[in-house]
Image (spheres, rainbow, N blue to C red):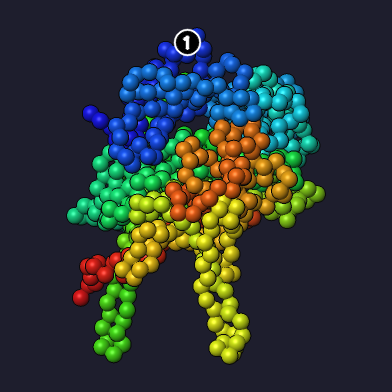
């Protein structure tokens, strides 16, 4: 049976790929970082060619380099290539790396001595088991003791009162182990001084001693006649929308071939990269700027979602199949949640003269996944609306980074207090989404729109008039842009060859949220490695292989291959196969309400039809009002 080129990997394909790799990669012990479908050429998919299923398998072995990237044709049963990466750009960390770093840290005599100096018991395995180690990427600011190109991690630690405790409540402050994974040693133990450990509980589970609300009545969402969407494989159809959803090792939740009423809109839409830079001067945090998507392979950290908790209503789930670091297939059930939600009023008007009203209700299709990366949890929610709007919403929750503090060390402008002897550093979460356009099936152009005030004149005597002004962005350098909410700035993707009933080219509007850009100075390692976050908008002509806003294989890299390098030639983007890169995010100034677990914060953007239809496309909605 022929498998559609963009269908998700099966469990059998994972097993077959690993077996084929091992038969080719003999006598080498490998630890795998990720497995995923190597997406076929866009032109081949659109040309409906017969395409073999090729799987990309990454990992490390005893070779002291950046690891391997293997391409395996599971259709033809052969290894196509196995490429070794250089030391300065390595495959993502895997669970073997993280576990090895923990073991090396807990067995280091100097580190144990420093922990004991803080009054913490390290005399037994049971005592050490209560110490939680969090390995962080070492790229950008690797310690001087780490030879150039060596694979490295920084390990910070926390103390749990028992195995079920929230370890983040008790940071072992001032202590960092620098781990050289390549050499298999802790090269340096950084001890910036003892800060007394907070003693207050950080528990947030229902079993913790607290009164639980008893006055919330059941809220049921039912669809007695079934859902309005259909799912076949990973293809989803709903109210004229057609789209495929899958999970990518780096990009997480991916949408492919999104169309509406058989009119293409996006070929591919997904997170490309994200960065979490910290603004605190404390040596425990000043170096932090993790590229969560690519350094950790965010897609491998996807949650298995639960009905009634993560998703509510009549749900359809999609599983995803991955690989463990040992090479075994791993199925994450319920990785993608698909359901419908009521979304209030779609449109309404009351006729005061006739004392009548017409109102229609909106609903949306939700396609979502949640990923846990260390202390933070990220939910990615694609919403499709009845009027053709497409929304991406990122939900941020989990546990904030923490510092133990005293009155002498308290630094409220960079690390506000959130609990007893506990503060949390200011930081950012910046997400770059790659939007590969295919609007109405043709080549596309990019325009910037904003409001301009009109000068005082006889036609505008009081200076109250303003107008919408559009500027055609024709090169990559012109398309490097920032949000400007004070002038209602937005961007339009236009198909010049497709015109609506009114003779205007069809378009979709990118409506940004009020998002910051990267605060790190331009000359910093953070800015070099996460250059994509320095602006809210970039645009490029489509080129096979250009998926990564920060460049591929970012472990230990210095920023090569990212958007700044991609756009250096200042290519033409007028009337082309257009890719738009949009960075959204928020700056988190922590508050007591964020502890011990953070209520959801939101960021994202909307894609809104603008001349894509000739009139309101929801006039045909049925009236559902009670008489």
Considering only vertical position in the picture, is 94 above or below 538? above
| Left or right position of 258 against 94 | left
Residue 562 in sight in this render: yes
Residue 380 in sight in this render: no
Q: Residue furthest top?
A: 27
| 227, 293: nearer the viewer | 293
Considering only vertical position in the picture, is 621 above or below 314? below
Disc 1 on helix, strand or loop? loop
Q: How many marks?
A: 1
Counting from the top left corner in percent of width and height, residue 28 is at 51, 12
Residue at the spot of label 1: 26
Counting from the top left corner in percent of width and height, residue 313 is at 31, 52
| 610, 282: nearer the viewer | 610
* Quadrant of image for the C terminus: bottom left
| 220, 525: nearer the viewer | 525
Counting from the top left corner in percent of width and height, residue 441 is at 35, 51
Q: Residue 190's quadrant in the figure? A: top right
Seen at 67% across and 25% down, the residue is 149
Seen at 67% across and 52% down, the residue is 519
Seen at 66% across and 36% down, the residue is 558
| Left or right position of 193 against 82 | right
Considering only vertical position in the picture, is 163 above or below 259? above
Q: Within 10 Å of the Cα at label 1, are there few (<14), some (14-19), or many (20+) other Cα atoms?
A: few
Seen at 30% across and 50% down, the residue is 242
| 294, 343: nearer the viewer | 294
* Quadrant of image for the N terminus: top left
Counting from the top left corner in percent of width and height, residue 614 is at 31, 68
| Left or right position of 429 against 435 | right
């Amino acid at each position: 049976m022929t498998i559609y080129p963009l269908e998700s990997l099966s469990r059998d394909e994972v097993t077959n790929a690993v077996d084929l790799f091992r038969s080719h990669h003999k006598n080498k012990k490998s630890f795998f970082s990720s497995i995923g479908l190597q997406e076929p050429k866009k032109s081949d998919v659109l040309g409906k060619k017969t395409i073999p299923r090729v799987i990309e398998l990454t990992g490390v072995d005893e070779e002291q380099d950046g690891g391997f990237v293997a391409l395996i044709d599971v259709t033809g049963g052969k290894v196509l290539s196995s490429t070794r990466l250089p030391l300065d750009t390595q495959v993502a960390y895997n669970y073997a790396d993280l576990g090895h770093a923990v073991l090396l840290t807990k067995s280091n005599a100097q580190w144990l001595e420093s922990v004991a100096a803080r009054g913490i018991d390290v005399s037994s395995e049971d005592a050490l088991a209560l110490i939680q180690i969090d390995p962080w990427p070492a790229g950008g600011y690797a310690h001087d003791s780490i030879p150039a190109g060596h694979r490295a991690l920084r390990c910070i630690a926390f103390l749990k009162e028992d195995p079920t405790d929230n370890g983040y409540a008790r940071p072992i402050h001032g202590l960092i182990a620098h781990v050289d994974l390549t050499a298999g040693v802790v090269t340096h133990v950084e001890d910036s001084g003892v800060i007394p450990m907070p003693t207050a509980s950080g528990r947030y589970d229902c079993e913790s001693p607290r009164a639980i609300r008893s006055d919330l009545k059941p809220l049921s969402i039912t669809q007695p006649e079934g859902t309005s969407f259909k799912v076949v494989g990973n293809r989803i159809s709903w109210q004229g929308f057609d789209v495929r959803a899958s999970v990518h090792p780096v990009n997480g939740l991916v949408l492919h071939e999104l169309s509406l009423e058989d009119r293409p809109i996006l070929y591919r839409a997904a997170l490309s990269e994200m960065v979490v830079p910290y603004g605190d001067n404390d040596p425990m945090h000043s170096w932090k700027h993790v590229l969560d998507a690519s350094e950790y392979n965010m897609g491998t950290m996807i949650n298995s979602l639960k009905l009634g908790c993560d998703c509510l209503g009549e749900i359809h789930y999609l599983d995803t199949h991955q690989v463990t670091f040992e090479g075994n297939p791993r199925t994450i059930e319920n990785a993608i949640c698909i359901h419908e939600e009521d979304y209030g009023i779609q449109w309404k008007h009351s006729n005061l003269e006739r004392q009548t009203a017409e109102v229609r209700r909106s609903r949306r299709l939700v396609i979502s996944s949640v990923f846990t990366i260390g202390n933070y949890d990220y939910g990615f929610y694609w919403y499709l609306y009845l009027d053709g709007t497409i929304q991406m919403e990122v939900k941020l929750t989990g546990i904030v980074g923490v510092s133990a503090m005293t009155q002498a060390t308290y630094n409220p402008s960079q690390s506000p207090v959130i609990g007893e002897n506990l503060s949390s550093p200011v930081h950012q979460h910046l997400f770059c989404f790659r939007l590969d356009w295919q609007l109405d099936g043709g080549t596309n152009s990019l325009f910037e729109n904003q409001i301009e005030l009109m000068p005082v004149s006889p036609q505008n005597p009081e200076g109250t008039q303003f107008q919408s002004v559009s500027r055609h962005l024709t090169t990559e350098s012109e398309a490097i842009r920032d949000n400007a909410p004070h002038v209602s700035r937005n961007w339009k993707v236009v198909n010049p060859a497709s015109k609506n009933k009114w003779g205007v080219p069809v378009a979709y509007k990118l409506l940004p949220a009020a998002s910051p850009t990267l605060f790190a100075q331009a000359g910093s390692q953070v800015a070099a490695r996460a250059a994509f976050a320095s602006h809210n908008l970039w645009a490029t002509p489509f080129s096979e292989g250009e998926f990564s806003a920060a460049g591929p294989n970012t472990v230990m890299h210095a920023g090569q291959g990212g958007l700044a390098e991609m756009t250096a030639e200042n290519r033409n983007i007028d009337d082309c196969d257009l890719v738009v890169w949009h960075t959204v995010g928020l700056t988190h100034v922590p508050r007591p309400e964020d502890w011990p677990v953070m209520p959801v914060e939101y960021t994202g953007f909307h894609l809104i039809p603008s001349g894509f239809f000739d009139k309101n496309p929801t006039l045909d909605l049925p009236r559902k009002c009670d008489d």
